[in-house]
């Protein structure tokens, strides 16, 4: 069944192309002439919603209709998912994503620890990209598995074990120390310097089974979003430009992007809801990478509040 709006567009096309008059076209298509000349009754609110949907879809081409709906509801719009889907479909917006298949090399027998609260389990890993002239650089990413917050995105030509320590040290000073860190068996993560430093801070390392990236699913999922929404769309003129754009995207990911597994809250909002105000208690002293080699106990000026 062809809708009246579709017939109206067909009649308009026939008249503009000189195929006949409006009366002839309406008679051929079975469209009443009053219906063709009827003025659109779309209210201003619906037009504003449509314009907002199209603007958000153009700004975030890799967002689906559910995430666009969540963003509009956060802005105060009362809107149904089906309307967003219909408007995007009429405008030709569609997110195509080809899933990659991976073959298991063996069944994992390692017990996978699930993050039960904030700062319980962090994950880190590397992803590579290149500048416009073909020079490759590496990106070290760090996330909180419970809140899905991206804690760091560090881009450099090469990242050594000492650089990893510096990045994690800065993240700990900003967010507090986690109980566990999950990683693969890369040389930067299994280095004795990294292991000794984390051991001094009483942070347990959870190494996944070699050849089993699915055991580090949270960071792999984050890398998929990072590549799909940023790396595959940007051409970096220099490493410095990549660092600036990555940091801007990290802030947007934490503060503005609704996350489907968090009930379409942003990671920052979900992290704030996890914070239950309690009476502050003394915490273990924090030692940086530079001072842990020379001193066994240096008190931290800032205490980390206890959490559930």
Image: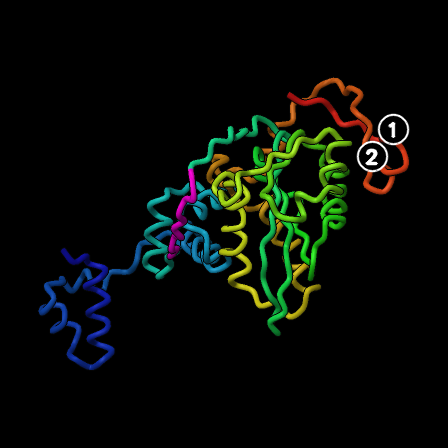
**Vertical comparison of 190 with 5: above or below:** above
Query: From the image, which quarter does the C terminus lie in?
Result: top right
Would you say 78 lies left or right of 149 here?
A: left
**Vertical comparison of 87 with 279: above or below:** below
**Vertical comparison of 64 with 169: above or below:** below
Closer-to-camera residue (287/95): 287
The residue at 33%/56% (across/down) is: 89
Q: Which mark is residue 111?
A: none
Q: Secondary structure at mark 1?
A: loop
Residue range highlighted in magenta: 96-106
The residue at 37%/42% (across/down) is: 80
**Residue 124: image location, x then y, percent:** 62, 44
Which comes before the other along the chain, label 2 or label 1? 2
Task: Tell whether label 1 touches label 2 (CB within 8 Å).
Answer: yes
Closer-to-camera residue (290/281): 290
53 in magenta: no
Crowd band around label 2 with a 10 angstrom C-alpha radius: few (<14), some (14–19), many (20+): some
**Residue 48: image location, x then y, percent:** 44, 53
Q: Which residue is mark 1?
A: 297
């Amino acid at each position: 069944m062809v809708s009246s709006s579709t017939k109206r567009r067909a009649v308009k096309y026939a008249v503009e192309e000189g195929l006949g008059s409006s009366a002839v076209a309406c008679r051929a298509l079975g469209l009443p002439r009053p219906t063709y000349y009827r003025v659109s009754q779309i209210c201003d609110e619906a037009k504003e919603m449509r314009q907002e949907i199209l603007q958000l879809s153009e700004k975030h081409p890799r967002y689906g209709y559910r995430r666009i709906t969540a963003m509009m509801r956060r802005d105060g719009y009362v809107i149904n998912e089906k309307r967003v889907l219909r408007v995007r479909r009429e405008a030709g917006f569609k997110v195509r994503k080809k899933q990659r298949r991976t073959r298991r090399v063996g069944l994992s027998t390692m017990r996978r620890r699930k993050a039960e609260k904030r700062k319980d389990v962090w994950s880190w890993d590397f992803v590579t990209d290149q500048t416009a002239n073909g020079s490759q650089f590496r990106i070290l990413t760090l996330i909180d598995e419970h809140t899905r917050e991206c804690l760091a995105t560090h881009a450099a030509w090469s990242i050594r074990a000492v650089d990893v320590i510096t990045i994690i040290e800065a993240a700990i000073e900003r967010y507090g120390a986690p109980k566990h860190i999950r990683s693969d068996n890369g040389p930067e993560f299994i280095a004795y310097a990294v292991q000794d430093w984390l051991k001094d801070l009483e942070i347990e390392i959870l190494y996944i089974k070699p050849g089993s990236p699915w055991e580090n699913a949270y960071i792999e999922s984050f890398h998929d979003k990072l590549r799909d929404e940023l790396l595959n769309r940007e051409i970096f003129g220099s490493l410095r430009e990549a660092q600036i754009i990555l940091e801007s995207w990290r802030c947007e990911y934490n503060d503005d992007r609704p996350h489907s597994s968090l009930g379409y809250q942003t990671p920052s909002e979900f992290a704030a809801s996890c914070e239950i105000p309690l009476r502050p208690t003394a915490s273990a002293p924090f030692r940086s990478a530079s001072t842990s080699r020379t001193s066994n106990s240096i008190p931290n000026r800032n205490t980390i509040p206890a959490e559930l």
